[in-house]
Amino acid sequence: MTMQRRNLLQGAAALAAFGLAGCATTSVPSKARVLVVGGGYGGATAAKYIRLLSDYKIEVVLVEPEEAFVSCPMSNLVLGGSRQLGELTVGFGALQSKHGITVVRDRVAGIDAVKKTATLASGPVISYDKLVLSPGIELMWDSVTGLKEANAAGQILQAWKAGPETQALRRQLESMPDGGVYAITIPEAPYRCPPGPYERASVIAGYFKQAKPKSKVLILDANPDVTSKAGLFKKVWAEQYKGIVEYRSQHKAVAVDAKTGTVKFEVQDDVKADVLNVLPSMRAGAIAVQSGLANSNGRWVNVNYRNFESTAAKDIHVLGDAIQVAPAMPKSGHMANSHAKVAAAAIVAELNGWEINPAPMLTNTCYSFVNAREVIHVASVHEYVAAEKTFKAVAGSGGLSSAPNELEGTYAWNWARTIWADSLA
Amino acid sequence: MTLRAIVSGALLAAFACAATAQDAKVLQQKALAATCANCHGTNGRAVEGSAVPGLAGMPAAYLIEQMKAFKSGARQATVMHQLAKGYSEAQIEQIAAYFAAQPRN
């Protein structure tokens, strides 16, 4: 007995002597559990890839309040009339049946980062070893006076979170008389999907050109210039939508009056429109803000980019639009899917006691339709730069389309089908 | 007896250490290859009727050659010539080895 214990002790001494402390022999704790909050491009991908990369050894629970995933990318085509919302909707069934993820339809009401538990709105408490938070964005209604009420009444829509509002905005466009004005206001960057508002304006202009050619599209941008694919969009407006699209920069919306269809701006004159589409400022999803994780301006979550762990709370990894972005990193669905894979690999490594990847990579490919068929893209590859603890675009990589083209229209829809499968099937 | 215990303990630890380092490398390779999956499908298996080719089961030498051709501009593309330039030769070799080892279906 004494002898055995001494041997054990000496074995342990030998381990220490060989300097193997950092080379843990532990494997995944038999019941390691990752709780994923949010089933969008970030959360769904993280849930699936934690299962894949751990050879299905780590338990994953996904909490999502919606019954199905509805894609924001491609939802502008619903506004243009070339796609239906049902084509952009994917259920969570495969995550459960193919990947053994427990999908809980609920909302997380609170997170206790010390006890490592989350409380669901319906009451149950779920404990976790790692939490993945991918809450998307919250619209800051109060940034535009009168907008919350006008939106609740269904008068002034955002349709920035794809869903019923997307269909409602389409109906407003359909019932607008020929010769009417559709106006979209864009908040100051950063906001979800930088080229999204310009794509929306273009696709709606395409619809007007065909169905009600005397109508106008007015883009009222709080920013000093078009924030993404500027040259390409401006060329499209000049060549395809002359007399239909008008772009005005430095128009920061501060108030709306739904009765008269008026937007008021910080500096510029009021604008009236038949269909008003007002995008307020945005911040990280409510749960991130409530949990004290939004430590960048009270709006976005600072993360360690190597593993996407919050700088405010250990073992909470935050993905997607909710984070304070690195240079040249857009708030996009593709980027959220990329974040998720880096975080999933880091979580699997950490739960195994392995070193996490010192050089993770991200990609982004963002397609924008300029009408029902033609597309322009921007693409980039990002590498983790250890010395600066951030991601940077790889020098010489990435770029834009040279001009709108139908081939990329095919690739854009293919991109959507593939990334939905990569995230959810 | 005591010496044997020390030696076997050390050997065991060294073995475990090599195994974890290897496992960590495999994980990193999988994560690197996953940066292609958004457009080419999870594990390189394209969705049905895809306009973009699946990568699973393609010979490593072919994948490396194509990536080099995208990088140099020898092969024209809408977007791959821009993305290929973001990857080093060593990364391309790892990605190619990963997809070559994946079953096509």
Image (cartoon, grey):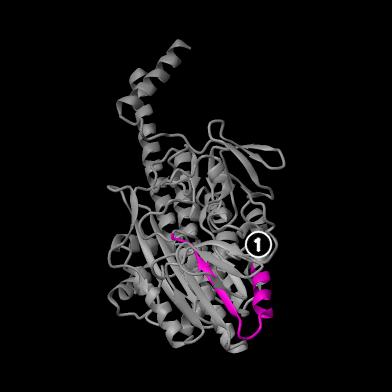
Q: Please determine whether, in this image, residue B47 is positioned above or below residue A40.
A: below
Nearer the observer, A405 or A77:
A77
Residue A369: horizontal and vertical position, in percent? Answer: 50, 77
Q: Quadrant of residue B17?
A: top left
Q: Amino acid at mark 1?
A: Ala
Q: Is residue A183 magenta?
A: yes
Residue farthest along the top direction in this orientation: A2
Q: Is residue B39 magenta?
A: no
Name the residue: 55% across, 40% down: A291
Q: How many marks?
A: 1
The 10 Å Cα crowd at callout 1, few under 14, some 14 to 19, many 20 or more, is some
Q: Which residue is mark 1?
A: A150
Name the residue: 67% across, 52% down: A65
Q: Quadrant of residue A16?
A: top left
Residue range in magenta is: A166-189
Residue A375 in sight: yes
Name the residue: 35% across, 29% down: B10
Nearer the observer, B10 or A160:
A160
Residue A177: horizontal and vertical position, in percent? Answer: 66, 83
Image position of A22 (left or right of A64): left
Residue A228: horizontal and vertical position, in percent? Answer: 41, 69
Q: Secondary structure at mark 1?
A: helix
Image position of A216 (left or right of A361): right
Residue A372 in sight: no
Nearer the observer, A18 or A45:
A45
Q: Chain of mark 1?
A: A
The C terminus of chain A appears in which quarter of the rendering? bottom right
Residue B18: horizontal and vertical position, in percent? Answer: 36, 41
Name the residue: 35% across, 57% down: A327
Q: Quadrant of residue B68?
A: bottom left
